[in-house]
């Protein structure tokens, strides 16, 4: 366990934004994790708030920083547990970099993660929000998740069904937010898979050809780089806005509003699109592409506040063009949210976790008037 003081969040996050973290504790094993939590709970520190940090690719830390303890599980390890003729069971540490895990599985031709190539962050972080892309979600290959239960103060294994995975959600970021710390993940992959070419970018890339798993991974890495999703080149937290999830009535209201505020053609375009981007965990809800709303409907690409800009390459990304503050990002979020609400009635939701902001600041950024 290593305890560091006043490390700038800007050095820990892919947005390169954020003030000092009072304490950053890096832990490499379960014992270190318990020690880190004990440190945070010390009376002498006034029981500081705890935040678990993964790869910092889905968080925005306030310019004032975080006056608490960030614990970063750097628990590593990639091992094969068992296999039969169809499946392979793997156990992977939460601190492993997701894309390295994907590369490892593709190397051995185990199917199930290839479409998640080049998603930044660590495996633990991917579990929390059921990360996914190009028609695949991590939940599809999770067998069980090993956790530390902060309420019961014990290590435990949660079967996939107990994790409550849905689109970008799980019990870890909803009903039991903050209770569990992921230490490792058991993944069940398939030996004889078939490429998932559901998404337009991927289909366009290959045309009628059915690619190998390796070719699919390479293509997705290329597509993502072309969209400005290389964190070594562009400073973002990926999508800053979540897709909208609507019930049938809400969706029909939206269609009617787009029909009257824009055009019948636009409304039909959206109707076609939702069919194409259905995901396994939509759970009966209708997923409306936030990218389509912001770009195709409202033309917001390039909108900016200070150093924060809606990326020209990927409209959902708020990009730090060099000197953006967390305040700039949130003012931009507010501006976009207001336009979206005014024109469509939809309420835009932030995808990155907001860390270290006061209630007053958040109330202001989420205000619609
Ligand atoms: C360029 C770019 C592209 C992206 N593309 C995608 C995409 O296509 N699909 C997608 O789903 N996401 C995408 N993201 C978002 C992000 O990469 C994923 O959500 C990723 O899974 C977050 O992992 P992380 O380790 O960085 O988590 P962090 O950002 O560090 O943390 C995210 C949340 O998880 C919690 N957490 C992290 N680790 C643990 C743990 N071990 N135990 C308990 N809680 C933990 C944190 O407390 C926080 O609440 C993208 C981000 C970037 C920068």
Image (cartoon, rainbow, N blue to C red):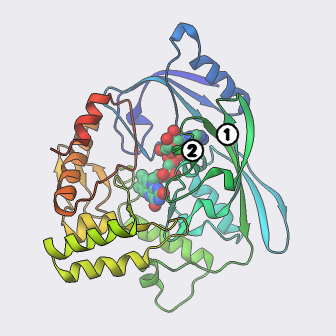
Q: What element carries label 1?
A: loop
Q: In which quadrant will I find the N terminus?
A: top right
Camera sees residue 266: yes
Number of other residues with Cα within 10 Å of mark 1, as a class: few under 14, some 14 to 19, many 20 or more: many
Percent coordinates x, y for residue 20 in the rendering: 39, 25
Label 2 beta carbon within 8 A of ligand 1: yes
Instruction: Residue at 84% x, 74% y: name it.
Output: 85
Label 1 beta carbon within 8 A of ligand 1: yes
Instruction: Residue at 49% x, 23% y: name it.
Output: 49
Left or right: residue 336 compared with residue 287 = left
179 lies above or below 20:
below
36 lies above or below 119:
above
Left or right: residue 33 compared with residue 331 = right
Q: In which quadrant will I find the C terminus?
A: top left
Number of other residues with Cα within 10 Å of mark 2, as a class: few under 14, some 14 to 19, many 20 or more: many
> In the drawing, what numbered circle is on residue 172?
2
Percent coordinates x, y for residue 287 in the rendering: 41, 67
Asked which quadrant contains residue 6, the reply is top left
Camera sees residue 324: no
> In the drawing, what numbered circle is on residue 287?
none
Q: Is mark 2 on a helix, strand or loop?
A: helix
Left or right: residue 265 compared with residue 206 = left
* Residue for badge 1: 75
Residue found at the far bottom of this picture: 208
How far apart marks 1 and 2 lie (CA) works out to 18 Å
Instruction: Residue at 57% x, 40% y: name it.
Output: 176
Percent coordinates x, y for residue 305 in the rendering: 17, 46
Q: Is label 1 in contact with label 2 (beta carbons under 8 Å)? A: no
Compare residues 250 and 296 and report the one nearer the observer: 250
Left or right: residue 342 compared with residue 19 = left
């Amino acid at each position: 366990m290593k305890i560091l003081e006043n490390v700038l969040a800007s050095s820990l996050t892919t947005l390169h934004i954020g003030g000092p973290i009072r304490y950053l504790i890096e832990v490499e094993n379960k014992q270190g994790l318990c020690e880190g939590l004990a440190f945070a709970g010390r009376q002498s520190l006034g029981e500081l708030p705890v935040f678990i940090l993964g790869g910092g690719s889905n968080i925005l830390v306030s310019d004032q920083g975080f006056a608490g303890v960030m614990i970063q599980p750097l628990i590593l390890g990639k091992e094969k547990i068992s296999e039969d003729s169809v499946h392979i069971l793997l156990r992977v540490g939460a601190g492993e970099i997701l894309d390295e895990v994907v590369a490892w599985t593709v190397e051995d031709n185990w199917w199930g993660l290839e479409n998640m190539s080049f998603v930044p962050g660590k495996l633990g972080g991917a579990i929390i929000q059921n990360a996914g892309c190009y028609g695949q979600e991590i939940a599809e290959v999770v067998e069980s998740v090993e956790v530390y239960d902060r309420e019961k103060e014990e290590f435990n294994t949660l079967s996939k069904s107990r994790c409550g995975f849905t689109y970008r959600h799980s019990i870890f970021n909803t009903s039991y937010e903050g209770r569990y710390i992921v230490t490792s993940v058991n993944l069940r992959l398939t030996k004889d898979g078939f490429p998932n070419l559901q998404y337009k970018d991927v289909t366009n890339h290959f045309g009628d050809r059915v690619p190998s798993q390796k070719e699919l991974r390479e293509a997705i890495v290329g597509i993502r780089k072309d969209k400005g999703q290389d964190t070594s080149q562009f400073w973002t937290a990926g999508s800053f806005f979540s897709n909208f999830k609507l019930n049938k009535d809400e969706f029909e209201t939206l269609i009617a509003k787009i029909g009257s505020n824009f055009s019948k053609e636009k409304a039909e375009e959206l109707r076609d699109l939702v069919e194409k981007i259905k995901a396994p965990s939509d759970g009966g809800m209708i997923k409306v592409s936030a990218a389509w709303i912001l770009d195709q409907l409202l033309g917001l690409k390039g909108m900016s506040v200070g150093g924060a800009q809606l990326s020209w390459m990927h409209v959902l990304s708020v990009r730090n063009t060099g000197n953006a503050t967390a305040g700039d990002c949130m003012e931009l979020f507010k501006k976009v949210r207001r336009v979206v609400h005014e024109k469509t009635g939809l309420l835009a939701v932030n995808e990155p976790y907001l860390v270290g902001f006061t209630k007053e600041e958040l109330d202001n950024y989420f205000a619609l008037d």
